Image: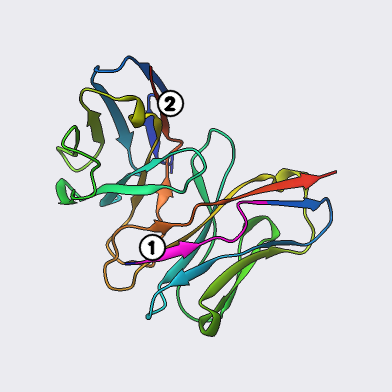
Amino acid sequence: AQSVTQLGSHVSVSEGALVLLRCNYSSSVPPYLFWYVQYPNQGLQLLLKYTTGATLVKGINGFEAEFKKSETSFHLTKPSAHMSDAAEYFCAVSPLNTGNQFYFGTGTSLTVIP
Amino acid sequence: DTGVSQDPRHKITKRGQNVTFRCDPISEHNRLYWYRQTLGQGPEFLTYFQNEAQLEKSRLLSDRFSAERPKGSFSTLEIQRTEQGDSAMYLCASRPGTTPQETQYFGPGTRLLVL
């Protein structure tokens, strides 16, 4: 079974500082990888995804993530945090062989300190 | 593209009552998914449809939960004899087709509180 681990349920950064949110997956075959953001009382919005090709993926709002097969990781970064980045972030995987459900991590709550 | 919509956005009910939630996917999206999200957790898969066919329902939490998508468009999720443990956010998502690399587009969710 797939599992997704997000290290750090809460991350705080100062405005303008680097954002790093960690995601590791467990699968012998790398799945497709997604990052979603959830603002309070809202649904999930896609930030970016990795399917094939370049391992560094750029998304919306200045976020990017790098797929590292050797580390089974897909960490999310942003060079300079903005107050509006404060939200819950979820990493999700979509197994190659099913195309059905997504498996989500438990989420990381990002706080941006002014 | 009006996005995935869900109704109601909030529902408060008493234990033992039945509730029904509706999801309208993005037009022409064949796949529709239901997830449950509890506080501090990521979404947990419940069931999904390919058009009107329910292809996976073993993950529904109990036989009190059921879902339908009668004409392959909107879907409903029903919880019978609600319990306090059913309190959660219920999310609906849709995707255009069947390939695993396609994005799932989520609705705003229905937040259920069982008293």
The range drawn in magenta is A2-10
Asked whether A5 falls inside the magenta stretch, the response is yes
Q: Position of residue A67 (x, y in %)?
A: 55, 76
Asked whether B91 falls inside the magenta stretch, the response is no
**Dot 2: chain letter:** B
Task: Say which residue label 1 marks.
Answer: B102
Q: At 35% across and 25% down in the image, what residue appears?
A: B84
Marks 1 and 2, how far apart in space? 26 Å
Q: Position of residue B99 (x, y in %)?
A: 31, 67
Instruction: Determine whether, in the image, residue A12 is placed left or right of residue B112.
Output: right
Q: Position of residue B90 (x, y in %)?
A: 37, 36
In terms of secondary structure, where does tag 2 sit?
Answer: loop
Q: Amino acid at mark 2?
A: Arg
Task: Say which residue label 2 marks.
Answer: B9
The image quadrant of residue B19 is top left
Instruction: Determine whether, in the image, residue B65 is placed left or right of residue A74.
Output: left
Q: At 25% across and 41% down in the image, what residue appears?
A: B61
Residue A65 visible from this viewpoint: yes
Instruction: Determine whether, in the image, residue A33 is placed left or right of residue A6.
Output: left
Name the quarter where the N terminus of chain B is drawn: top left
